[in-house]
Image (cartoon, rainbow, N blue to C red):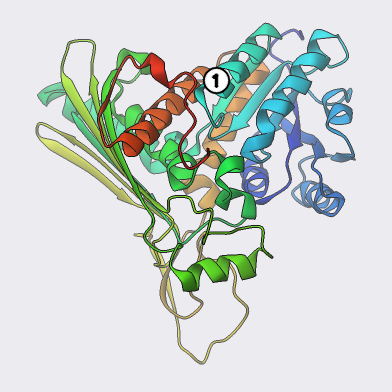
Amino acid sequence: MPEFPIKRLRVGFVGSGFIAGFHLKAMVGVRNVEVTGVYSRSAERRERFARNVVEHDLGDCRTHDSLDSLICADDVDAIWILSPNDTRLAVMQEIHAAVKAGRSRVFAVACEKPLARTIGEAREMLRLAEDAGLNHGYLENQVFCTPVIRGKEIIWRRAAATTGRPYLARAAEEHSGPHEPWFWQAARQGGGVLSDMMCHSVEVARHLLTEPGAPRDSLTIKAVHGTVANLKWTRPHYADLLAERYGGEVDYRNKPAEDFARSTIELEDAAGNPLVIEATTSWAYVGAGLRIQLELLGPEYAMEFNSLNSGLRIFMSRAVTGDEGEDLVEKQNAEQGLMPVLEDEAGVYGYTDENRHMVECFRKGERPTESFHDGLAVVEILMALYRSAETGQTVRFPAPELEDYVPLVAR
């Protein structure tokens, strides 16, 4: 272990895809950090990622052709796990083995959401990190969204302090579908949209309902009820589009995963007050692009946020033509008309503050506010929602029957 605080944190990325690109953009707004290494299975992507690191002036990034090479590099202090869901436990096992054997200097690890595909996997991720003496952070960006940080601070300081704590949080995240084929493969991803996006919604809602400075487990989950549906992508036309887009890797005619999910979560605070979370997620939303909607309600107040209600809008007539892209907003669905523009997606979505928080905590030897413990808690909620959707019944906590549960769609 180094002597804290260290001057600069040297980060190695596992994964070089879409989400790794978001984290790299966010690192531009973070001090005291260098991105010194990257490993992914694609040599072309590794090289492109390393070039982007240099272009962003984030250090001299070495490409590694094996995970072990990255983990054991003498210029890597912390690992960001950003690879597909079905690889994360194996990545953590390699980190654990190398650190325990004294072959690696890595002392911290951060993992993208969700922490794992099942409760068993999530518990093992946590066990491996702590057995190796690693500091650990759970990368849940919506908790660090700039509107969430500012809105929660105002609500709890001004409104809750005078009229009582908030009691209802609503969270929704919707877009037209993921970028990579593995997201659509239930066994690899762990499910469908409930696994992919409900992890955001339940954790940001739980965060908003938690009193500032209090641990997240100051709220007790009492019961959850979930429903899932296949609204769009199982229709023959759209199932065929997926097969064409991904070269047969995705078969939604025979192996679909849910593209809509809804949840109701009942909680209780330390004083016994009932609290409620309502969350919806969808891959079947076609609008300007990714839409995040958040609400926090209390006795005499309400907070609202919609990511597409941006201050900047641009209109382009049908005479303006060009290639499709995502230069205005993530999951952009049009290049013409009146469109919102997110000037700083990495900041608004929370990636910048999330990475700043993780870097500073790891650099100083402090535990992040979002750790693998929180990642495990989120997976427990997700498994309860899947179980509820499968049985049509409310799942009440504690729920030991979920320990070995694998969602129906992933089975």
Is 80 placed left or right of 72 in the picture? Answer: left
Which residue: 13% across, 23% down? Answer: 164
User: Mark 1: which secondary structure?
Assistant: helix
Q: 18 and 362: which one is in front?
A: 18
Residue 391 in percent (x, y) is at: 31, 34
Up the image or down, 133 lies above or below 237; here it is: above
Residue 82 in percent (x, y) is at: 66, 38
**Residue assigned mark 1:** 120
Q: Is residue 316 visible?
A: yes
- The crowd level at tag 1 (other Cα within 10 Å; few <14, some 14-19, many 20+) is some
Is 16 placed left or right of 308 in the picture? Answer: right
Q: 149 and 295: which one is in front?
A: 295
Q: 130 and 215: which one is in front?
A: 130
Number of numbered discs present? 1
Write down the quadrant of residue 244 in the picture: bottom right
| Residue situated furthest bottom in the rendering | 319
Q: Is residue 214 visible?
A: no
Q: Say what amino acid the circle numbered 1 marks.
A: Gly
Which residue: 50% across, 62% down? Answer: 329
Up the image or down, 217 lies above or below 409; here it is: above
Residue 148 in percent (x, y) is at: 37, 38
Up the image or down, 113 lies above or below 4; here it is: below
Residue 9 in percent (x, y) is at: 73, 25
Write down the quadrant of residue 180 in the picture: bottom right
Which residue: 59% across, 74% down? Answer: 324
Q: Quadrant of the N terminus?
A: top right
